[in-house]
Image (spheres, rainbow, N blue to C red):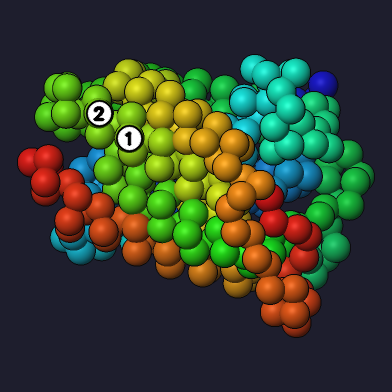
Amino acid sequence: MIEWLLQPWPWYVSGPLIGLTVPILLILTGKNLGISSSLRHIGAACNPRTRLPYLSKDYSWREHIWSIIFVVGVIIGGFIGNYLLSADPVNFLPSGFVSVTGVFLLFGGGILIGFGTRYADGCTSGHTIMGISALNWPSLVATIFFFVGGLISTWFILPLFGF
Amino acid sequence: MRKHIFTLLMGIYFGIVLVKTQVVSWQNINDMFYFRSAYMYLVIASAIAVGAVSVFIIRRLNAHTVEGEAIEIQMKPFHKGNVIGGTIFGMGWAITGACPGPIYAQIGAGTLLAIITFLGAITGMYFYAFLQPRLPHDSFAWLNARTGSAGSPP
């Protein structure tokens, strides 16, 4: 049992466990699963005096603090999963990223993630898992375009940088 | 306070599962987009299947939270950002091997280069916040009204 726990989990265990986050989170806290909104709330928390409407209009600290607490949990969970529940801790980025090009790609890719998820109003958690589970068709549209973007980068952009 | 503790525990749960599934691995994302491996597709499909059955049951039973509040399931409206923003996000996802959840999980898991991805994501969020009033957010109200998606775009 312990040995099995320490290996990477097969898809038919981990996929359903990811899916179960949706109902457990709803029942315990009433919140709809979503991660990328944390970026907005971190931005708003760091700039209480901003005039940007996106970070100030109708902003309710009480309503949104959960999203920052949740991602703090994800960081702790990442640590537990890789160091306490793993036979061999894994590095999740290939070694090629330890380079000037790699850092440039990560920062640039990060900008695309931050801008894109906020413009699309959700990410793979909020749209792909939560939105499609709720049969919200715009989430399916968003997910299809997540894949379109992913295919563009993987086939045409990453090879330019030797990845 | 109890709610915040539940939220933190659920975040920890989600982080552990993301890491143990290795959906936070750049290589797995790359293999998915090259159609080399069915693994990610099976994870995503089974997650949605379990999520969809759960949401169906919650709606059917009109379930409440443990604190007795009604559960509201958001139906985000369609708008142009789903397409344009979605494509831009997908490009970043494939480059960095991380969507927002995995960025945090990677940092916790000691893949500290993901801090660069995180700083990029915060920068990108600010770009959006600055440009938001000028970006198209047409939401096709007639379409959303017909299909039950509600609310207003960001």
In the displayed structure image, the side of residue B41 where residue A43 appears, left or right: right
Indicate the position of residue B115 as horizontal and vertical percent values: 38, 21
Given the image, on which type of amino acid does mark 2 rest? Phe
Indicate the position of residue A84 as horizontal and vertical percent values: 38, 19
In the displayed structure image, the side of residue A128 where residue A85 appears, left or right: left
Q: Measured along the vertical axis of the image, is residue A68 above or below residue A155?
A: above
A103 vs B18, nearest the viewer: A103
Task: Give the letter of the chain under mark 1.
Answer: A
Instruction: From the image, tell me which residue sits under label 1.
Output: A108
Residue pictured at 17% horizontal, 46% vertical: A158
Residue pictured at 42% horizontal, 49% vertical: B89
Which type of secondary structure does the marked residue at label 1 adopt? helix
Task: Give the letter of the chain under mark 2.
Answer: A
Q: Measured along the vertical axis of the image, is residue B109 above or below residue A57?
A: above
Residue found at the far right of this picture: B68
Q: Tags 2 and 1 in contact by the CB under 8 Å rule?
A: yes
Residue found at the far left of this picture: A162
Look at the image and tell me whether residue B114 can be seen: yes
- State the count of labels: 2
Q: Measured along the vertical axis of the image, is residue A91 above or below residue A54?
A: above
In the displayed structure image, the side of residue B14 where residue A14 appears, left or right: left
Which type of secondary structure does the marked residue at label 2 adopt? helix
Instruction: From the image, tell me which residue sits under label 2.
Output: A104
Q: Which quarter of the figure has residue A89?
A: top left
